[in-house]
Amino acid sequence: MSANYEDRDRNRNYDDRQRGYDGDDDGDRGRGQGRGGRRMHRRRICRFCIEKVDIIDFKDLRLLSNFVPERGKILPRRISGNCAIHQRMLAEAIKRARNIALLPYTTD
């Protein structure tokens, strides 16, 4: 007999409780409009693949300087939009150009 009362009390307490986030029925919990606050980014296309570049020359400073910001770091793939193969070739070309002092390692 006491088991029935306990089940009834448990169900009533479950149904009567209030939500802590003001009854937000859509489930986003106040993140604003859209898809949970994430931005939709368009996938960048590798410019070396478009131009069908086989080898990235380390002596082409005008090209390499586009992928090295003022601080001297190599831009990552997700920002530059390169594919994995061309990003590796680009990093190697930048490192070779730095080694023979065509590009600086860092700024002053």
Image (cartoon, rainbow, N blue to C red):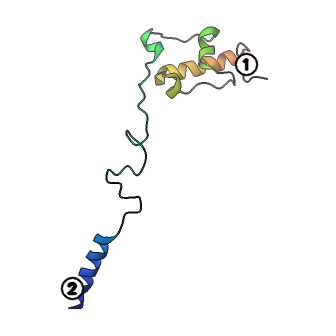
Name the residue: 42% across, 11% down: 50
Residue at 50% across / 19% down in the picture? 86
The answer, for residue 60, to whether it is visible in the render is: no
Question: In this picture, is 108 found above or below 17?
Answer: above
Q: Is residue 30 left or right of residue 62?
A: left
Position of the C terminus, as image quadrant, is top right
Corner quadrant of residue 76: top right
Residue at mark 1: 104
Percent x, y for residue 46? 45, 18
Number of marks drawn: 2
Q: Tell me residue 5's x, y (percent).
A: 24, 86
Q: Is residue 84 left or right of residue 90?
A: left
Residue 48 seen in this snapshot: yes
Q: Is residue 10 left or right of residue 55?
A: left
Q: Position of residue 75 (x, y in %)?
A: 58, 25
Disc 2 marks a residue whose amino acid type is Asn
Q: Are marks 2 and 1 in contact (CB under 8 Å)?
A: no
Q: Three-letter amino acid code at disc 1? A: Pro
For the residue pair 47 and 18, the one nearer the viewer reads as 18
Q: Residues within 10 Å of mark 1 (few under 14, many from 20)?
A: some
* x and y percentages locating residue 47 in the rendered image: 47, 14
Identify the image quadrant of the N terminus. bottom left
Quickly name the residue at label 2.
4
Q: Which structural element holds mark 1? A: loop
Quadrant of residue 10 within the rendered picture: bottom left
| Picture residue at 72% right of the left edge, 23% below the top | 105
The kind of secondary structure element at disc 2 is: helix
Q: Quadrant of residue 102?
A: top right
Residue farthest front in this picture: 22
| Position above or below: 84 against 61 | below
Query: Callout 2: 10 Å neighbours few (<14), some, many (20+)?
Result: few
Camera-near label (2 vs 1) is 2
